[in-house]
């Protein structure tokens, strides 16, 4: 099983994505080879100390005299290495000098406008029979990276028949380490994100860990049972609590005793996704008033949005299909 990654920004984002995916697969017991093809004057990977035993890292110089024999050997089917993750030069996405067979090809896309434009330019230059995948890396919200990448491609005139966007992105690389410390919260989250990406491209490629709470809980000392409520359950619980508080019946002594303790607390602010625009038919504002809505909970990003307080119909956007995050 082989998956090929290309960096949409040059090289860094593709290498980052390839390493995260390879390390994640190895961490759940899949024998994995990370195969990086470099030029004679390209930088090599730093020495990697915290990698699973099941991960093998190989770098081949494409200008070397033995490359023509080494590359096929490293990518040949081998029961002892069930997964090969290729980190390939960006130019090979359009004109690959080696035979990759029918393996999925993934173009990693960075979060900046320039990186997204470079990735779309690379995508236009490809002429593969198989539609390539686009993978967002380093976006503020992993769940929203696919929307941003898809909107970028749509603005460039590429439709869903010429692209496939992986529905979950990858976190940004760390500045001072190739990977988070093994067993840390960040490692658990990045491994799970990378496994989602791999299984989206190759369904069933590797086993997924249990519920996210089960993955994170052992890392956090003193944490109780994982909270598995979804957004709907949390909102229903909040509504019930508000009703009970209004009647003076919340919180009960039992609920208070079981609640987490917050020390050295103070009131703070955090940004939330909201809509800004001119409103009509609002019960509290005159037509044409410019308003900022309460927090957006769900939207189809085209015709409607449900905020904390009410449902809105979406009319004409301010720009080309804003991304609700």
Image (cartoon, grey):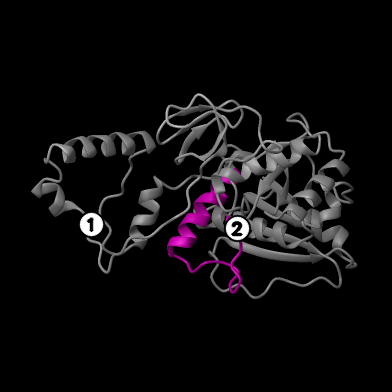
Tally of numbered discs: 2
Residue 205 horizontal/vertical position (percent) = 58, 42
Q: Check disc 1: other Cα within 10 Å, few if <14, some if 14-19, many if 20+.
A: few
Q: Quadrant of residue 239?
A: top left
- Residue range (magenta): 171-198
Q: Per the image, is 63 magenta?
A: no
Q: Which mark is residue 260?
A: 1
Residue lying farthest to the front in this orientation:
286
Does the segment drawn in magenta span residue 189?
Answer: yes
N-terminal of the pair, mark 2 or mark 1, is: 2
The front one of 132 and 24 is 132
Q: In which quadrant of the rendered view does residue 237 lie?
A: top left
Q: Which mark is residue 166?
A: none
231 vs 313, left or right, is left
Residue drawn at (23%, 38%) of the image: 242
Q: Position of residue 121 (x, y in %)?
A: 84, 47
Q: Residue at x 80, y 53 (%)?
A: 72
Which one is nearer the viewer's eye here, 38 or 259?
A: 259
Label 2 SS: helix
Q: What mark, if any, has residue 20 been given in the picture?
A: 2
- Where is 249 relative to 33, above or below? above
User: Of residues 149 and 213, which is closer to you in this image?
Assistant: 149
């Amino acid at each position: 099983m082989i998956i090929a990654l290309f960096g949409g920004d040059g090289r860094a984002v593709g290498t980052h994505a390839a390493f995260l995916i390879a390390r994640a697969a190895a961490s759940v017991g899949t024998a994995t080879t990370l195969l990086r093809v470099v030029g004679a004057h390209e930088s090599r990977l730093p020495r990697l100390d915290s990698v699973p035993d099941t991960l093998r890292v190989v770098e081949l110089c494409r200008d070397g005299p033995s490359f023509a024999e080494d590359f096929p050997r490293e990518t040949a089917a081998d029961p002892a290495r069930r997964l090969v993750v290729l980190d390939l030069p960006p130019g090979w996405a359009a004109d690959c000098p080696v035979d990759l067979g029918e393996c999925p090809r993934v173009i990693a896309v960075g979060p900046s406008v320039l990186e997204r434009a470079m990735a779309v330019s690379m995508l236009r230059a490809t002429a593969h029979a198989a539609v390539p995948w686009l993978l967002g890396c380093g976006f503020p919200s992993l769940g929203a990276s696919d929307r941003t990448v898809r909107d970028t491609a749509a603005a460039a005139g590429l439709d869903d028949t010429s692209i496939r966007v992986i529905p979950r992105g990858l976190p940004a690389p760390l500045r001072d380490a190739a990977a988070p410390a093994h067993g840390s919260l960040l490692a658990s989250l990045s491994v799970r994100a990378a496994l989602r990406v791999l299984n989206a491209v190759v369904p069933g490629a590797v086993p997924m860990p249990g519920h996210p709470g089960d993955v994170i809980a052992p890392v956090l000392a003193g944490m109780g049972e994982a909270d598995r409520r979804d957004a709907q359950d949390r909102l229903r619980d909040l509504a019930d609590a508000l009703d009970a508080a209004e009647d003076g019946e919340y919180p009960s002594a039992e609920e208070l005793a079981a609640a987490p303790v917050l020390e050295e607390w103070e009131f703070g602010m955090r940004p939330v996704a909201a809509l800004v625009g001119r409103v009509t038919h609002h019960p509290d504002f005159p037509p044409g008033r410019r308003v900022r809505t309460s927090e957006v909970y769900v939207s189809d990003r085209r015709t409607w949005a449900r905020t904390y307080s009410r449902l809105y119909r979406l009319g004409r956007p301010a720009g080309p299909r804003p991304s609700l995050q």
